[in-house]
Image (cartoon, helix red, strand yellow):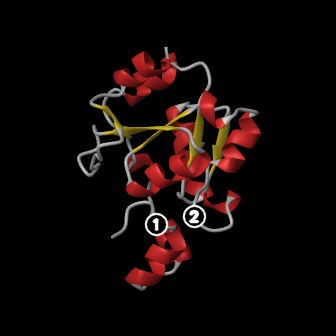
Amino acid sequence: MTFGALLAEECARLGVTVEDYLAHYDEAKAVPFDGVDDLVAHLDRWAVCSNKHAQSGRAELARLGWKPEVALFADAFDGPKRLEPVLEALGAGSAEVVFVGDTDHDRRCAEAVGCRFALATWNPRARATDSDIVLRMPADVVELVS
């Protein structure tokens, strides 16, 4: 599996419909990594840029009580997620943001707009490159943006 893949592409690859996937997806089982809830509470401005289906993404945000300034999901992009619409919605330039992610696709999104990329290695699937800012725990983000 390629991390950061579009839901429709993954469903097609696995031979299931998006509708069937969503009917069986339990957003209550999606939990943040340890420390992420505390991180979110300390951020003044933050956004979500995700290939996740909007229905499940919004339900998870609501359940967690998280209120990002901008939350864009798969339905907001023509293809895989991109940071340009997020930056535009935030009214921010690429030099003003740090994109925290855990996939190669996330890294490419940051590179495409010229913003800093920080790798969230609290996800054990994350693989660092020499150019990454490596974050060991969510609290490291607060130090990075302070």
Q: Quadrant of residue 14?
A: bottom left
Q: CA distance from mark 2 to mark 1?
A: 7 Å
The answer, for residue 16, to whether it is visible in the render is no
Q: Quadrant of residue 51?
A: bottom right
- Looking at the rendered structure, the kind of residue marked 2 is Pro
Q: Is residue 56 above or below residue 79?
A: above
Q: Residue at x 76, y 33 (%)?
A: 91
Q: Position of residue 143 (x, y in %)?
A: 41, 16
Q: Is residue 18 above or below residue 87?
A: below
Earlier-in-chain disc, 2 versus 1: 1
| Residue behind mark 1 | 5
Q: Residue at x 57, y 52 (%)?
A: 112
- Looking at the rendered structure, the kind of residue marked 1 is Ala
Front residue of this view, candidates 120 and 96:
96
Front residue of this view, candidates 15 and 133:
133
Q: Horizontal placement of 37 versus 136: left or right? A: right
| Residue behind mark 2 | 80
Q: Decide: marks 2, 1 in contact (CB < 8 A)?
A: yes
Q: Secondary structure at mark 2?
A: loop
Q: Position of residue 100 (x, y in %)?
A: 45, 38
Q: Is residue 35 above or below residue 110?
A: above
